Image (cartoon, coloured by chain):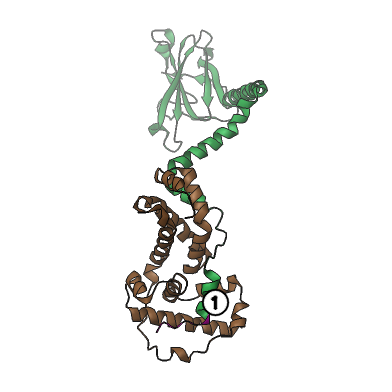
C-alpha cells in the first residue's frame, strides 16, 4: 500500500491535502498506465485527470484499504478503456495457425530501443490492438478476462493480440 | 494459443513499474473538479493578497489618499470641462424684455427633431432680458423664451424659438460642442 490508512480516511472526508498526497503517491505510476493505453500524451493527461476524479469520487467503494493499489490501477485501466470505447472496433477473428510463422525480432536489437521509442510504437497501434496488448502483456489479464472487460470473445482477444504484435514487428523491422 | 515471445518480454520488462513524471498542471485540474468552491476562494485570496500589500504598509495610506483625491479632482474637472453654458438675451424688437421664462429642449435625433425633443431645463429671464442654462452636455437643442404673461410685451410679441423668423417657420437647432454658446432670442411680433 503506497499511502497510509489515515490518508485514505481523510480522502474519504474530502480533505484536499490528503487527496493531493494520494495523487502524488500514485500519479507517476498511473500516468505510466495512461501513456500505454493512450494514443498520445495529451489523451494520456485527460485519462489521468478523469481517472483521479473517479478515484476520489468512488473511494467509499473501496472495500479494503490494503487493496487500494490494485483498485486504483483497475480504475485507471477502465477509465482508459472507456475513453476509447467509441474507437474500439475489433476486427473479425483471424486464424492463428500462422502466428508462429512470424519471425521473432532480434532481442539485442529490441533492447536497444528506448522507453520512448517502445512507447511510440505502442501508441501508434490501432486502439483495439493497443488495448488488448496492454491488458494481456503488461497488466496480466488472460484472454477470458479481456473478453469480459471488452465484451468480445476469447478468440477475438487472441487475434487482436496477434495482430498487435504483427504490426509491431512490421514497424520494428523498418526501424531496426 | 497464448505463446509468449520476445516482444512481450521486452514490453513487459520496460513497462512494469513504468513511472514517468506526470504533467505538472494535472493535479490543479483534478482539484478544481473536486473542489470548485475552493478554486473560487483561492482566486479571491490571490486578489486579496495583491491588495494586502497596502494593508501591510500603513505608510502607504497618505499616498493612496492623495492618489484618490487627485483621481476625484480629475473626474470632477473632466465632468465639468465637458459641460457647457448657454446664455443670452431676449429681445422684443430693439429692447430687451424684462422678465419671462426661457425653455431649453434637447433634440435627440436631428433628422426628426420634433419627434425626439424633450424639455430639460427652464431658466428665468431677468429684468435685463438675460437668461442662462448651465451644466449642458454636448448635443442639439431648441431654445424658447416666453415673456411674462400679463405684461405689455405679451400684447405685441409671442413666445419664440431661437432664430425663428415667422410663426409658422421651424425652430433652429443650437449645437453645443466645445464652446459655451451665446444665443440671443428675438421674439416674433404678433
Residue B142 x %, y %: 46, 26
Q: Which residue is drawn at 37% across and 86% down?
A: A94
Residue B141 visible in the picture: yes
Q: Which of A93 and B11 is in front in this view?
A: B11
Which image quarter: residue B107? top left
Which picture quadrant has residue B49?
top right
Give percent across and percent down for residue A120: 55, 73
Toward which corner of the image does residue A47 lie, by quadrant? bottom left
Range of residues picked out in magenta: B1-6
- As drawn, the chain in green is B
The chief SS type of the magenta part is loop
Q: Does the magenta stretch include residue A83?
A: no
Q: Mark 1 lies on which chain?
A: B
> Which chain wears brown?
A
Regarding residue B26, the answer to whether it shows in the image is: no
Q: Residue beneath label 1, please? A: B10
Q: In the rendering, at what x and y percent does residue A58 appear?
A: 37, 52
Amino acid at each position: 500500500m503506497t499511502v497510509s490508512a489515515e490518508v485514505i480516511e481523510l480522502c474519504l472526508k474530502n480533505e484536499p491535502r490528503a487527496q493531493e498526497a494520494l495523487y502524488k503517491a500514485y500519479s507517476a505510476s498511473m500516468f505510466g498506465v495512461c501513456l500505454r493505453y493512450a494514443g498520445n500524451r495529451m489523451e494520456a493527461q485527460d485519462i489521468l485527470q478523469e481517472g483521479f476524479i473517479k478515484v476520489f469520487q468512488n473511494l467509499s467503494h473501496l472495500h479494503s484499504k490494503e487493496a487500494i493499489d490494485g483498485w486504483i490501477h483497475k480504475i485507471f485501466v477502465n477509465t482508459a478503456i472507456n475513453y476509447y470505447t467509441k474507437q474500439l472496433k475489433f476486427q473479425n477473428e483471424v486464424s492463428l495457425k500462422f502466428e508462429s510463422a512470424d519471425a521473432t525480432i532480434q532481442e539485442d536489437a529490441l533492447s536497444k530501443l528506448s522507453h520512448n521509442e517502445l512507447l511510440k510504437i505502442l501508441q501508434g497501434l490501432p486502439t483495439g490492438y493497443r488495448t488488448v496488448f496492454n491488458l494481456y502483456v503488461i497488466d496480466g489479464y488472460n484472454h477470458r478476462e479481456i473478453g469480459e472487460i471488452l465484451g468480445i470473445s476469447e478468440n477475438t482477444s487472441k487475434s487482436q493480440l496477434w495482430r498487435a504484435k504483427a504490426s509491431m514487428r512490421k514497424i520494428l523491422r523498418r526501424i531496426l | 494459443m497464448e505463446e509468449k515471445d520476445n516482444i512481450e518480454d521486452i514490453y513487459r520488462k520496460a513497462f512494469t513499474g513504468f513511472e514517468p513524471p506526470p504533467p505538472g498542471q494535472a493535479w490543479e485540474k483534478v482539484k478544481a473538479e473536486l473542489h470548485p468552491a475552493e478554486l473560487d476562494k483561492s482566486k479571491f485570496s490571490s486578489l486579496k493578497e495583491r491588495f494586502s500589500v497596502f494593508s501591510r504598509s500603513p505608510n502607504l495610506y497618505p499616498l493612496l489618499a492623495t492618489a484618490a483625491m487627485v483621481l476625484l479632482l480629475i473626474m470632477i474637472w473632466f465632468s465639468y470641462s465637458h459641460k457647457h453654458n448657454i446664455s443670452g438675451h431676449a429681445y422684443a424688437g430693439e429692447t430687451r424684455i424684462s422678465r419671462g421664462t426661457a425653455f431649453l429642449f434637447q433634440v435627440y435625433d436631428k433628422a426628426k427633431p420634433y419627434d425626439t425633443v424633450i424639455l430639460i431645463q427652464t431658466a428665468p429671464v431677468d429684468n435685463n432680458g438675460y437668461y442662462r442654462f448651465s451644466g449642458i452636455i454636448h448635443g442639439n437643442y431648441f431654445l424658447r423664451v416666453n415673456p411674462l404673461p400679463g405684461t405689455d410685451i405679451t400684447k405685441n410679441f409671442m413666445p419664440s424659438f431661437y432664430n425663428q423668423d415667422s410663426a409658422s417657420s421651424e425652430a433652429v437647432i443650437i449645437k453645443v460642442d466645445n464652446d459655451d454658446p451665446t444665443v440671443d432670442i428675438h421674439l416674433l411680433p404678433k
